[in-house]
Amino acid sequence: MSVELESLKQQIAALPKPLKAQLAAFLTEQLQQPELPPITNGAGDDDEIRQRRLAWIKAHREEYDGQYVALSGDMLVGAGRTIREAHEQARAKGITHPFLVRLTSEHETLSAGW
């Protein structure tokens, strides 16, 4: 076992029980998250990733209407009323550069402000 892990375990052992419970809940949630597929920038991958994102957006636009979503490939890694909220959720899952977009209903009319 690494020295860093042993040090971390000692720090955790010194925490009060309520904080240990919060940490346990967080780690349990992290373990239940699906493994994210690697995103590469190899030849042809960019088109495939765009197509997968577009398909996800089309399939979920009504469900997340009016919200910002953060995607890693075609996997949802964050969602919220603000772009910051969606981005922070993605970062909490280890995704540093998610694809961020605001979803609108298929029937919503967008205005250019005129």
Image: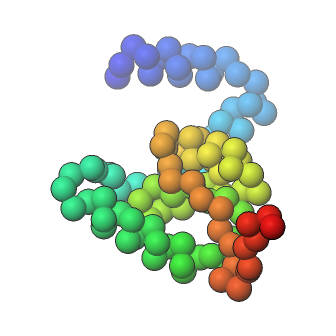
Quadrant in the picture for residue 19: top right
Q: Is residue 113 above or below residue 86?
A: below
Instruction: Name the residue at the bottom extreme.
Output: 107
User: Looking at the picture, how far across and down is residue 17, in whole percent?
Assistant: 75, 30
User: Looking at the picture, how far across and down is residue 54, in whole percent?
Assistant: 46, 72
User: Looking at the picture, how far across and down is residue 76, in whole percent?
Assistant: 54, 61
Q: Is residue 56 left or right of residue 79?
A: left
The foreground one among 112 and 5 is 112
**Residue at x-position 61% and y-position 23%:** 12
Quadrant in the picture for residue 27: top right
Quadrant housing the N terminus:
top left
User: Looking at the picture, how far across and down is residue 59, in whole percent?
Assistant: 54, 80
**Residue at x-position 50% and y-position 49%:** 98
Total tally of numbered discs in the picture: 0
Instruction: Name the residue at the front extreme.
Output: 114
Say if residue 84 shows up in the picture. Answer: yes
Quadrant housing the C terminus:
bottom right
**Residue at x-position 30% and y-position 67%:** 48
Name the colour scheme: rainbow
Q: Is residue 41 left or right of residue 84?
A: left
Q: Is residue 29 above or below residue 103?
A: above
Quadrant in the picture for residue 52: bottom left
